Amino acid sequence: MQGIQTFSMIKPDAVSANQIGAILAMIEKAGFAIDAISMLQLTQTAAEHFYAVHADRPFYKDLCSFIASGPVVAMVLKKDHAVADLRKLMGATNPAEATEGTIRKAFATSIDYNAIHGSDSDETAASEIFFFFPGYSLLIKRKPIL
Ligand code: GTP
Ligand code: MG
């Protein structure tokens, strides 16, 4: 069964270009509910931990420096098939290959500055949500107040 949560992050390029609102609008219009949200700046160490899976790639250092270069907007997003549907909405990693209507087509300027991150599996989503929102439970449903 596919999960109903994913983790997403508006990257420093899009934040500094004042595109937070436009990107959140696309996310909400696509049917995602924003379940948690936080604006923060990662330390270099935190960025290196977040992208540790890419540690052996030649672009790793530059990628981590970029992610730590300014504030990001971290989010938990809810929707059926959240991981796959957000990846579709984001578009290809390289915006030159991103299709019309995707966030990266609209806002990414290069493969290095590609505006948004989205988890690539339910397992990654769980660990990324825990990394940014340690108080967020994937297991216990929130009860309505009333
Ligand atoms: P994220 O949502 O940021 O994880 O992107 P992704 O899942 O679409 O791609 P991936 O996890 O494979 O790579 C992480 C980031 O590394 C990408 O967003 C790119 O900025 C960068 N990256 C990946 N592949 C390349 C590459 O071949 N060259 C360069 N310069 N950067 C790359
Ligand atoms: Mg990735």
Image: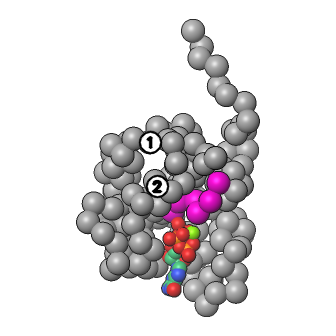
Badge 2 crowding class, 10 Å Cα cut-off, few under 14, some 14 to 19, many 20 or more, is many
User: Is 66 on the left or on the right of 3, as rendered?
Assistant: left
Secondary structure under tag 1 reads loop
Residue 28 appears anywhere in the view:
yes
Does the stretch in magenta take in 120?
Answer: yes
Determine whether 121 is above or below 74 in the image: below
Badge 1 crowding class, 10 Å Cα cut-off, few under 14, some 14 to 19, many 20 or more, is many
User: Is 26 on the left or on the right of 132, as rendered?
Assistant: left
Q: Give the percent coordinates (x, y) of residue 110.
A: 38, 79
As measured in the structure, the alpha-carbon distance from the residue carrying label 1 to the one carrying label 2 is 9 Å
- The residue labelled by disc 2 is 86
Q: How many marks?
A: 2
Residue 138: give its label.
Answer: none
Residue 32: give its label.
Answer: 1
Depth check: give the residue in front, 79 or 41.
Answer: 79
> Which quarter of the picture shows residue 122?
bottom right
